[in-house]
Image: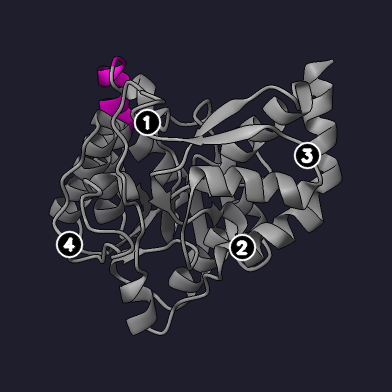
Amino acid sequence: MKILLTGGTGQLGNDCRKVLEDRFQVISLGSKDLDIADGAAVNRMMNDVGPDIVLNCAAFTRVDDCETEREPAWKVNVEGPKNLAKACRNFDAKLIHISTDYVFDGLKKIPEPYVETDAANPLSYYGLTKLEGEKAIRNVTENHAILRTAWIYGIAGKNFLKTMLKIALKSPEKEVKVVNDQFGSPTWSFRLAEQIEKVIVENGQGTYHATSEGYCTWYHLATGFLERMGITHSFLPCTTEEYPTPAKRPTNSILENAHLKESGLQVMKAWGKDLDQFVFLYRERLLNEIKEGMS
């Protein structure tokens, strides 16, 4: 089976390539290799590669920047998936697309999770574009799987954990406020890549939630990570109101992987156990990466 991976140089794309290339022929492309917002370019690539599956990990994910950079965000998050869906329909391929918890408004009472059948109501422009991207795919091709995930971290690229580590290493005595009233499920990109592999192997169809089991706040994630890393910090919990951002975030981003479980496809694990393994595998590499960047 041949898989065309878009967004292959990103955090999730990097782990998808690692997981999938042992079992499939993977053609991994970054944004410099293929602009998914360019329909003609997508068709040429599909014709050249002839994939059985297109795995779309490409996205405009800078949530706050989406509020002002609306045109590029729309092109990548809406026009891109639409172009891929059309090409998959025309070239008889399946599309697997990565979406987000930000399609929901987060107003459910914590800890009640969102399931796949809950009504979407995004608070931010990023969430709106991701929802419209989902709709475009559903309108174009039935042969698809959409996986909504949340709070992704991994060894490649930038993420919340690396930012917290850099702050703590640079100024361990400086008091830093971290939001403690937004709840979600931290999800390791490597585990999500394994989940995607399971969906591919079992020919999963439709919309799935795919996050780690359990939930926490950003503050508890940050402090839990640094404790596992053995790093001193002076982080303090704060409210969303005390840490305003251009884009409004959902208070409740807890997703229930109902469709995965009902279909017997679930491979996701408890977020704390995955974080333990992540630190065990990458502690020294993370420290070296941050220290080199600070020097």
Q: Residues within 10 Å of mark 4 (few under 14, many from 20)?
A: few
**What residue sits right under mark 1 in the picture?**
41
Q: Which of the two discs, 1 and 3, labels the residue nearer the N terminus?
A: 1
Q: Which mark is residue 286?
A: 3
Distance between the Cα atoms at labels 4 and 2?
26 Å
> Amino acid type of disc 3?
Leu
- What's the residue at 62%, 40% (across, down)? 161
Q: Earlier in the sequence, mark 4 or mark 2?
A: 4
Amino acid tagged 4: Asp
Picture quarter containing residue 122? top left
Picture coordinates of residue 131 (x, y %)? 22, 44
3 and 2 marks in contact (CB < 8 Å): no
**Relative to the observer, which residue lies in front, 184 or 45?**
184
Q: Are marks 4 and 2 in contact (CB under 8 Å)?
A: no
* Dot 2 or dot 1, earlier in sequence: 1
The residue that label 4 is drawn on is 118
Q: Secondary structure at mark 3?
A: helix
Instruction: Name the image colouring.
Output: one colour
Which amino acid type corresponds to the residue marked 1 in the rendered image?
Ala
Q: Considering the image in quadrants, where does the C terminus appear?
A: top right
Q: Residue at x 44, y 79 (%)?
A: 265
* Image location (x, y in percent) of residue 150: 42, 50
Residue 117 higher or lower than 8, as above or below: below
- Distance from disc 4 to disc 3, alpha carbons, whole Å, reads 37 Å
User: Does the residue at mark 2 contact the one at mark 1 (Cβ under 8 Å)?
Assistant: no
Vertical comparison of 103 with 73: above or below: below
First in sequence: mark 3 vs mark 2: 2
